């Protein structure tokens, strides 16, 4: 594996790529050209049937292009053996697409096994990938897909796609079939992985908010995969190219700026009392009393937040493992401030924040998010004032001329 923060992805270039299906007059994809930068996430977003999935699938030749050229790291993808090509490209889809009669470990190890890796190397890689996506190998290695939640299945799907350490990862609406909280957590997980792995990722979605959160660049696509705008999320939010793109941005563009700001961009609070799950309830009760606090945050053996306990929960508790209430939601340093706001509404107060491996990093409070929103509104107002001043100045110049 590459060193953290080292780019392991490669550039993808599509040149005048077209796909025509027999019996149809218009092409599904018409003259599509784009450069996907190495080590970046590029999101294709557009309405159903616009050709975005077809375009992505031509990269690994699950759909064969009718014409055009596709290069991956400088290699002509259309001249490579198709099996060789696909083993160099990770592929993650909605509902994971796991083999139902394979265990989690067997699913993750499929491609390394096909590549002829030794059994010990495959087993080590499977364990490494499970740890990377936040699944304890001891708990999940021998389970079958039917024994997993939707979010856990998606994590296995991502681990399988990354197992052979491919430079390119294609993701076709991979989080579209899970509930909103799980979806947000999986998005955070992908962003966390990307800071470590720096793959080249092409991600397809119809959800513009998801595109803004995940994309280094967004391609807003129209019919036949015509590129309406290809730019950074910031630029698209600030200056939609046309009315169709503006329709995708939708109302509340200024509030969507919260999706551009990460939890890591604001100051976290360190005032929560934390305790290990192995600590005695009596000791925790004494600490709460001494510090005049009502709640303690319980961490597991890897310092990951698992539950809140109120001082009254500790009177008859024999262990912290079942006292209090499990966390309904938490956020990571990769989460957006919009995610944090939604988590606060679910939790009913401040929310624990986790670091790069799920460890406790602090809490984020509603006052912090509100202050950030107010600052954004002031900045937005100042920008409009400057624009208005420029217009008046231009009008004055026109009169004097």
Image (tube, rainbow, N blue to C red):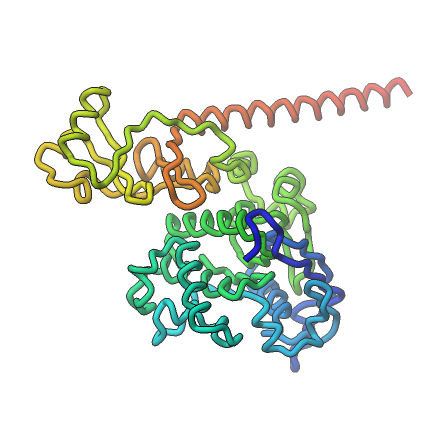
Q: Tell me if residue 357 can be seen.
A: yes
Residue at coordinates 60% horizontally, 27% vertically from top-left? 380
Q: How many marks?
A: 0
Is 226 situated above or below 288? below
Tell which of 195 and 51 is nearer to you: 195
Q: Residue at x 10, y 32 (%)?
A: 315
Q: Is residue 132 above or below residue 307?
A: below
- On the image, the x and y values in percent for residue 123 come to 41, 67
Q: Quadrant of the C terminus?
A: top right
Vertical order, 280 against 105 (above or below): above
Task: Give the quadrant of the N terminus.
Answer: bottom right
The quadrant in which residue 96 appears is bottom left
Question: Measured from the top left, where is residue 221 in percent x and y?
Answer: 64, 57
Q: Is residue 29 left or right of residue 334?
A: right
Residue 44 shows in this picture: no
Name the one closer to the observer, 76 or 340: 76
Q: Position of residue 111 (x, y in %)?
A: 49, 72
Q: Is residue 308 left or right of residue 246?
A: left
Q: Residue at x 58, y 74 (%)?
A: 62
Q: Residue furthest right?
A: 401
Quarter of the image where one finds residue 270: top left
- Give residue 71's position: percent from left, percent from top: 71, 66
Query: Which of the 4 image quadrants contains residue 290?
Result: top left
| Residue pictured at 74% horizontal, 69% vertical | 69
Q: Residue furthest bottom?
A: 23
């Amino acid at each position: 594996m590459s060193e953290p923060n080292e780019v392991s992805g490669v550039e993808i270039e599509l040149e005048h790529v077209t796909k025509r299906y027999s019996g149809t007059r218009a092409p599904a994809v018409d003259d599509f050209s784009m450069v996907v930068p190495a080590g970046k996430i590029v999101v294709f977003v557009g309405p159903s049937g616009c050709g975005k999935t077809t375009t992505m699938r031509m990269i690994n030749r699950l759909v064969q292009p009718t014409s055009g050229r596709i290069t991956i790291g400088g290699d002509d993808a259309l001249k490579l053996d198709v099996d060789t090509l696909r083993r160099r490209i990770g592929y993650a889809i909605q509902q994971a697409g796991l083999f139902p009669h394979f265990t989690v470990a067997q699913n993750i190890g499929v491609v390394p096994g096909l590549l002829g890796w030794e059994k010990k190397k495959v087993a080590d890689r499977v364990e490494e990938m499970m740890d990377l996506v936040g699944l304890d190998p001891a708990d999940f290695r021998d389970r079958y897909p039917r024994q997993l939640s939707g979010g856990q299945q998606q994590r296995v799907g991502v681990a399988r796609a990354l197992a052979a350490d491919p430079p390119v990862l294609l993701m076709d609406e991979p989080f579209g079939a899970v509930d909103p909280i799980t979806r947000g957590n999986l998005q955070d997980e992908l962003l966390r992985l990307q800071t470590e792995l720096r793959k080249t990722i092409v991600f397809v979605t119809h959800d513009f908010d998801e595109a803004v959160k995940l994309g280094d660049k967004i391609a807003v696509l129209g019919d036949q995969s015509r590129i309406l705008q290809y730019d950074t999320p910031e630029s698209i939010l600030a200056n939609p190219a046309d009315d169709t793109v503006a329709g995708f941005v939708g109302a509340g563009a200024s509030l969507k700026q919260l999706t551009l700001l990460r939890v890591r961009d604001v100051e976290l609070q360190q005032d929560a009392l934390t305790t290990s799950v192995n600590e005695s309830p009596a000791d925790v009760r004494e600490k709460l009393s001494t510090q005049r606090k009502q709640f303690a945050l319980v961490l597991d053996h890897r310092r990951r937040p698992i539950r809140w306990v109120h001082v009254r929960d500790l009177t008859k508790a024999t262990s912290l493992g079942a006292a209090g209430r499990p966390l309904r939601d938490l956020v990571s340093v990769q989460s957006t401030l919009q995610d944090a706001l939604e988590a606060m509404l679910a939790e009913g107060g401040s929310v624990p924040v986790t670091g790069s491996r799920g460890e406790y990093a602090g809490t984020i409070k509603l006052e912090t998010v509100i202050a950030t929103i107010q600052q954004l509104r002031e900045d937005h107002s100042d920008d409009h004032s400057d624009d208005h001043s420029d217009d008046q100045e231009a009008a004055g110049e026109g009169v004097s001329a």
